[in-house]
């Protein structure tokens, strides 16, 4: 069963809680702004906290302004970025996948990448083309972030029988497909 199928089949519970009046007002404003129910918003916020923010904080992730990240990343050469991806990047991602999911497979790598993108307000789209996953990203994180991500992900995917193919890069976006190694 895939991670998406597990999410669809979730059992729900009724829970009654008390919250600060000012927080309640802000939650209701957010619901109106996003045109969603309070239940949906609270479930979304709790899910992000429990299944992402809390975990990545425990693992030592830090918050940084986009412009600072972009400037730091773009000041390095493509070779330097690949070297970082090859050394700490791969081991950090493997540790994160094991910490969050307990295993590394195609679904966990894609779910981790998707959640990471969404939490950085990076546009993520996954579509199926000829039985393969195609990932399309729109971002403003500089020219080297895609190089880092594709290199890092490809090394990890190779270990579980997949490979990134047909990668395309431009100034604010990149895309790639994921294929089984035996199909290439």
Image (cartoon, rainbow, N blue to C red):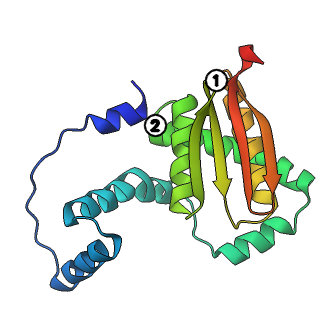
Q: In this orientation, does residue 84 appear?
A: no
- What x and y, as percent, mark residue 2? 42, 28
Q: Is residue 182 above or below residue 83?
A: above
The one of 25 and 105 positioned closer to us in this rendering: 25
**Mark closer to the chain start, 1 or 2:** 2
Horizontal relation, residue 101 to residue 74: left or right: left
The one of 174 and 151 positioned closer to us in this rendering: 174
Horizontal relation, residue 140 to residue 43: left or right: right
Q: Which residue is mark 2?
A: 101
What is the secondary structure assignment of the residue under circle 2?
helix
Say few, some or many: other residues with alpha carbon within 10 Å of mark 2 (under 14 / 14 to 19 / 20 or more): some
- What x and y, as percent, mark residue 55? 44, 53
Q: Which residue is mark 1?
A: 160
Horizontal relation, residue 66 to residue 99: left or right: right
User: Residue extending furthest front?
Assistant: 130
Q: Is residue 23 above or below residue 6?
A: below
Q: In this orientation, does residue 171 appear?
A: yes
User: Residue extending furthest top?
Assistant: 182
What residue is at 21 percent from the left and 66 percent from the top? 38
Q: How far, Cα to Cα, is label 1 from label 2?
A: 15 Å
What residue is at 65 percent from the left and 38 percent from the top? 134
Q: Is residue 32 above or below residue 45?
A: below
Which quarter of the rendered picture does the N terminus lie within?
A: top left
User: Residue extending furthest bottom?
Assistant: 22
What residue is at 72 percent from the left and 27 percent from the top? 158
Task: Say how many tags the image has.
Answer: 2
The one of 89 and 39 positioned closer to us in this rendering: 39
């Amino acid at each position: 069963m895939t991670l998406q199928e597990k999410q669809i089949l979730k059992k729900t519970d009724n829970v009654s809680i008390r919250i600060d009046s000012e927080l309640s007002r802000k939650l209701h404003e957010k619901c109106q702004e996003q045109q969603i129910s309070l239940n949906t918003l609270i479930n979304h916020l709790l899910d992000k906290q429990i299944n992402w923010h809390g975990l990545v904080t425990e693992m030592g992730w830090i918050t940084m302004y986009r412009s600072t990240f972009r400037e730091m990343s773009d000041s390095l050469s493509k070779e330097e970025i690949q070297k970082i991806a090859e050394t700490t990047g791969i081991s950090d991602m493997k540790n994160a996948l094991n910490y969050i999911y307990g295993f590394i497979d195609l679904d966990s790598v894609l779910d981790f990448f998707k959640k990471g993108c969404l939490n950085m307000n990076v546009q993520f789209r996954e579509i199926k083309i000829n039985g393969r996953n195609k990932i399309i990203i729109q971002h403003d994180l500089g020219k080297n972030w895609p190089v880092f991500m594709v290199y890092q992900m490809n090394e990890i995917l190779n270990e579980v029988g997949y490979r990134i193919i047909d990668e395309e890069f431009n100034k604010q976006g990149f895309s790639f497909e994921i294929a089984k190694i035996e199909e290439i």
